[in-house]
Amino acid sequence: MSLSAEVDIEVPFYDVDPMHVVWHGHYVKYFEQARCALLRRIDYDYPAMQASGYLWPVVELHLKYVSAARYGQRLRARSTLLEYENRLKLGYLLTDVETGQRLTKGHSVQVALHAATRELQFVSPAVLLEKVRAAR
């Protein structure tokens, strides 16, 4: 069973560029909203990460733009847990709420760093493994 979460977003005016489409960098913000929803679903969002003694920087981000989003369009951003044993890899899909049309897809990779030492953890900390297993 895959874990996922969705958020609905209405494209605000300040996210569009002079060509009246969403500026490419804002798609990352939409992915982030879905990522936060998924992390909250497993009870391990950013404050919980910090409280557990680990930092989780994004070390890889990939986006594929399929079709442009526009001002006022209602979007659905979905985040799905792809990997978690050695790193946190999340997949993303951004679609139009009304038509289901795919607009953007991608993935991100985060790795655990021990907060006090900044040492990279080559295996995900037990706290993440427990949170994922509990959410399944």
Image (cartoon, helix red, strand yellow):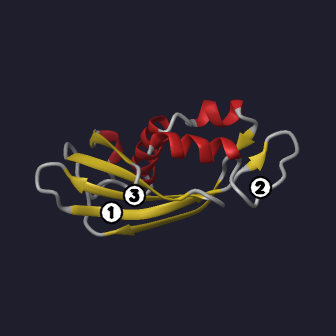
Q: Residue at x 29, y 39 (%)?
A: 12
Crowding at label 3, few (<14), some or many (≥20) Cα neighbours within 10 Å? many
> To which residue does mark 1 refer?
104
User: What residue is disc 3 on?
Assistant: 92
Query: At which x and y percent is residue 63?
Result: 43, 66
Cβ atoms under marks 3 and 1 closer than 8 Å: yes
- Residue under circle 2? 121
Q: Does 116 sit above or below residue 58? A: above
Q: Nearer the viewer, residue 28 or 91?
A: 91
Q: Residue at x 88, y 45 (%)?
A: 117
The reply to whether discs 1 and 2 touch (Cβ–Cβ < 8 Å) is no
Foreground disc of the pair 3, 1? 3
Kind of residue at disc 1? Thr
Q: Nearer the viewer, residue 99 or 121?
A: 121
Q: Earlier in the sequence, mark 3 or mark 1?
A: 3
**Where residue 60 sits: x, y (%)?**
59, 64
Of badges 3 and 2, the one in the foreground is 2
